[in-house]
Image (cartoon, grey):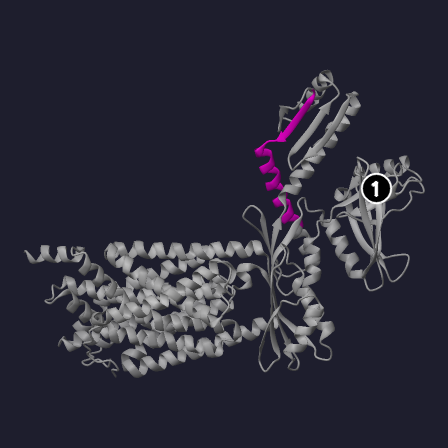
Amino acid sequence: MHLVLEVDADKAVESAVERRVAEIRRAAEQEGIAVEKLERRGTKQIVLEAKDEKALGEVEKILGSYPEMERSRRGPAGLLLTMSGQEVAAIQERALEQNVEKLRNRVDEFGVREPLIQREGDRRIIVQLPGIKDPERAIKLIGKTALLEFKLVDNQHNLEEALKGKVPEGSQILYQKVLDEQGRVVQRIPFLLEKKTLLTGDVITSARARPAQQPPDFEVGLEFDREGARIFDEITGKNVRRQLAIVLDDNVYSAPVIQTRIAGGRAQITGRFTPEEARDLAIVLRAGALPAPVKVIANLTVGPLLGQDSVRAGVQASILAGMLVILLMAVYYRVAGVIADLALFLNLLMMLGVLAGIQATLTLPGIAGIALTVGMAVDSNVLIFERIREELKLGKTVRSAIDSGYGKAWVTILDSHITALITAMALFLFGTGPVRGFAVTFALGILINLFTATVGTKVIFDWLILRGMKRVSI
Amino acid sequence: MEIVGKTNIDFLGMRRIAFLASALLVLVGLFASVQIARGRANLGIDFVGGTSVQVLFDRPVELGEVRTVLAGGGFADSELQQFVGGRRLFIRIKASGESVAGTGARIEETLRQGVSGNPFILESSNEVGPVIGRELQVAALWAIAVSLLGIVTYIAWRFEFRFGIAATVATFHDVLVVLGIFFVMGKEITLLIVTALLTLAGYSLTDTVVVFDRIRENFRARRRGSLAEIMNASINEVLSRTIMTSVTTLLAILAIYLLGGEVLHDFALALLFGIVIGTYSSVFVASALVYEWRVRFRRSGIETKRQAQSLH
């Protein structure tokens, strides 16, 4: 399976800005500064309105510790903070790197042999998972952002009113999906939650799938680190009798009422999981949330059978192609043709050797490249032989006909190989995946051929002449 | 053994007919290019985005049945193609939204539930987002542009500018003609076909270079005779080589065409057409272009060089 993921790096910037909003708000509250409005605008801006100019002056002191936020005045007591381009780029870069790392952790835990996870450019990640049996499950595992958040249910406002469109500031509506036994969504229950996130999945040290209280469902048990346990203890202590929602990627999984203060840092996510789903969820939670969500923009899956099937067809075709060409050369040029056939054989052998050396995977277009090379490989020898025939017709001796045949054909061979190589290079530079495979075998064939068809055959001719060959069968 | 002995064909004398035939074919190719640019051609999902699924059933299936099942699953606008006695099925759906992830799995699920009593295995599934498709289109155009530029530069350096242009025009001609043929046949233009077109560009260029090399050599050898005579003689001299090489390559491609399986079928077909057209163009078109240019605009690098040489 070959996946191309597009990384939404702007989301990472958004959450970084959001974090700063929360920090500034907390600092302002602590100092008792009257801030009327403080919120993120767009991807990288913060709008701030202080009560008056005096309050604004105090806020600006706090902002001193955020040099990356460029300030500009907006109205009498307002500011517009814009994150510097440098910081934005740094955050995006870090998000991409962390994404790759977290995806690698997930894939490693999922247990795939020889996975390939790498960046491609500024916004893409390539994930290759050979021999995956359940592609859909793998996509879910990879595509999930896995942002786990704990949020309090808003009990100050009316859910009905909010559903009608009057969502109170600082709150949001999220849904819980209720599934039946087959895993189909039968109901969506709305929840009015406070926007403020109390705890995220960052504090998870362990996540494990285990049977839930109602069989056959499974659930995921979580353990937090010391800091997470302390915060969780504090939250539950302060909010006894209130509902605490467990939100994963903006879906509410459960919203139990806090019965008592919970120390020790343990929690669980329930929600009609099958054992596999619970296991996969545990994997993504352990590996951690992706700082930037990803979207699968290309997914190429080749079943193992087709792979074998078509590769076999390709190999058969190449063998037939080789035999036809060998036969034709031997019939048309006789002994010289057989010499060219030897060179062709050497060409193929070296090519396979190099391909094995660079550990290239033979794709179908790659095999087509080899077959095409077979067809074109003898071209150089055809050029040389036709030249020798001409020279012989001019009445030259065998030796000088062969020498000048090679000499005169050489320039042409070089020219034709270089032009073919230019095309192969263009294919390699701008092609992707299979096209590159084709370009590589094609270019290899051309380069190796330059040697085998000229030096390889000349050596045999020279040897024959040394042995006293008087006539040339060509 | 010799199939083509010493020939003396007046290739340049036939240039008017060749130009006319080529012009017509190129016109079709240009029309095809315009249609492709306008999105009216049968572009593969690798260029427009979409999903293709290949499955192999245990027993032959009815296309009509599959179509109904897919339409019921919300895949009404899918294209179907059948192979191997009706057991193997290609399903292609062009992209509608930005994200295509999961379409392949949904198609598979729809088939599993809809076509009962005839199990199948999923052989391959490709999902390509439209973003990638657009990028591949651009990349393909770049590949064509860069290889053409590289070729002109090289040949202009090795020969002279005029030859470089003629070789490029002849190569472009071959690519356009094959594109036109594929368009008329209603074949899908996929990434693999573009690869084939570029490969045949390389091939046909090689063919042309061999002819040009001989022309240059004969000019340098200070042969007697008019420009047309020297050029004709050169083409005739390399004719047996041109035909021999085309035949060996054709044999190889024919093997891929016949045995390479469905995936390589159209790829091989494009190369088959390409080799025939490429051989034709290097014999009838490329040199004729140089000749025509030379005759119309008298002075040429080769001639001045020759005159300079003959003064000594």
Quadrant occupied by the N terminus of chain A: bottom right
- Residue A385 image offset from top left, x and y in percent: 25, 74
Where residue B28 sits, quadrant-wise, is bottom left
> For numbered disc 1, what is the local secondary structure?
helix
- Considering the whole magenta stretch, tell me its main secondary structure: helix
In the picture, measured across the screen, residue A374 lies left or right of residue A196, that is left
Along the line of sight, which residue is nearer the eye, A275 or A241?
A: A241
* Residue linked to disc 1: A162
Please name the amino acid that badge 1 sits on.
Ala
Q: Is residue B156 magenta?
A: no
Residue at (35, 71) in percent of width and height:
B277
Task: Give me the residue at 79% from left, 40% from top.
Answer: A199
**What span is in magenta?**
A77-102
Q: Is residue A471 above or below residue A300?
A: below
Q: Chain of mark 1?
A: A
Residue A86 covered by magenta stretch: yes
Across and down, in percent, residue B304 comes to: 13, 55
On the question of residue A216 being in view, the answer is: yes
Query: Is B16 displayed left or right of B181 in the figure?
Result: left
